[in-house]
Image (spheres, grey):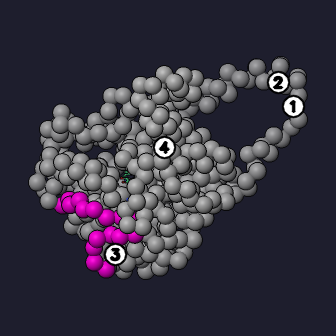
Amino acid sequence: MHLVGRAGQVGQRGGRGGGRGVGEVLVGDERVAGPRAGLLHQSTPRVALAVAERRHDVGHALDDRRGREVVTPAVAGQQQAALAQLVPLLPPQVLEEGGAGLRRADVEEHPASHGGDPTAWRQTRSVPWDPGFFHDSYPRLEAAFGARLDESLAPRDPSVLLQVVRELDLRPDSRAVDVGCGEGAYAVRLATHFGLRVLGIDPVQRHLDLARAARRDLVPDIASRLAFERGTATRVPVADASLDLVWCRDVMLHVEHPREAYAEFARVLRRGGHVVAHQAVTTDLLAEEEADWLFDVMGVVPSSADPRVLDEGIAGSGLEVVDTLDLAGEWGEWSQEQEGAVGRALLHLARLLRAPERYRAEFGDAAYDVMLGECRWQVYVTMGKLGGRLDVLRRP
Ligand SMILES: C[S@@+](CC[C@H](N)C(=O)[O-])C[C@H]1O[C@@H](n2cnc3c(N)ncnc32)[C@H](O)[C@@H]1O
């Protein structure tokens, strides 16, 4: 299977030691983002996926204020009805409708990583500033240029992860774990789309409670394929060589030692079993002080957002790399194109920065910081300060 090659070009920066983030707790020897961990980071993709699945009538809803994907009691009935229509399993073409598919043939790959040259973005000037061009020539083409930029580059959306799983061609009833399952939305998708038996694990009790509550609203055929238990990326509560798939979405950057997590994934996988893992990673465009502030607020272990640390962890784990896909800021572009989510985050960011006391007084300093962090995260993901990296690994 080949997705898109060029592993490790997601962006590079020096790893920094990891201070502990605000509001996080320790579970065993691992850092866990605080009470809002399940709401963090990929709110852009959450919106995108919600839109994609709303389009497919899967029955998830959008939180009215945050654009966050939720499954509310009000939609649980619709969801049940929708899921009932999904049994037997969704035909493959449903997954292909979202976004631009797995591979990019028409658009240059890795737009934000500059081929690994950390200074390339500062060197893109090819001609000296020319007042004649600036004041006379450029205004003549500016409108056409803007119109061209209004055309979508057909960014991939979060359903790309499910498309990867589909390419693995797992038999129904294959066994999977969703590591850091949060509220269980993706465990449900894996069971619904592919008929997998999925154990969702998470160290945060609130997430497990919500996942179990959502499970109760599902049709029996789907619900019977799902279980949720406490666990972490380095302590997956299953026997050796018992799984066909490890799904790990936006979790590794909370893990203190990714190498131990990848080794744990190798332990629980059968020979020929796969890991499908996605997370945001730092790129050269993210200034050190931006990273320090953001990761502290969002409970991220800084070194675990460094793609080189991930590469090293994978290399020492006993897993082999099938492929690595650099999604850059495509999910951000997609959610902006679909819902204007990034523009909204930018507007919120502007308001947070211009009138901090107004929001601090109403919601408190801690909430202010996390909201500021979430808005920055969405904007940074979209503009390439954070990249999107998808690893497909295999236990040989
Ligand atoms: C950003 S959320 C992602 C949730 C879900 N995977 C998704 O894609 O929507 C991160 C999740 O990782 C969990 N988490 C944090 N530290 C973890 C660890 N060391 N091992 C496993 N999960 C962890 C959090 O509780 C939270 O549910």
Q: Of helix, strand and loop, which mostly describes the magenta segment?
A: loop
Q: Of label 4 and label 2, which has the lower sequence position?
A: 2
Q: Residues within 10 Å of mark 4 (few under 14, many from 20)?
A: many
Q: Of label 1 and label 4, which has the lower sequence position?
A: 1
Residue wearing tag 3: 268
Residue 16: % across, % down: 63, 59
Q: Mark number for residue 83?
A: none
**Which secondary structure, mark 1?**
loop
- Above or below, 142 relative to 199: above
Mark pair 1, 2: CA separation: 8 Å
Drawn side of residue 376 relative to residue 268, left or right: right
Q: Residue at x 47, y 28 (%)?
A: 360
- Above or below, 109 relative to 143: below
Mark pair 3, 2: CA separation: 60 Å
Drawn side of residue 140 relative to residue 245, left or right: right
* Residues in magenta, as a range: 225-240
- Above or below, 137 relative to 383: above
Q: Is residue 239 magenta?
A: yes
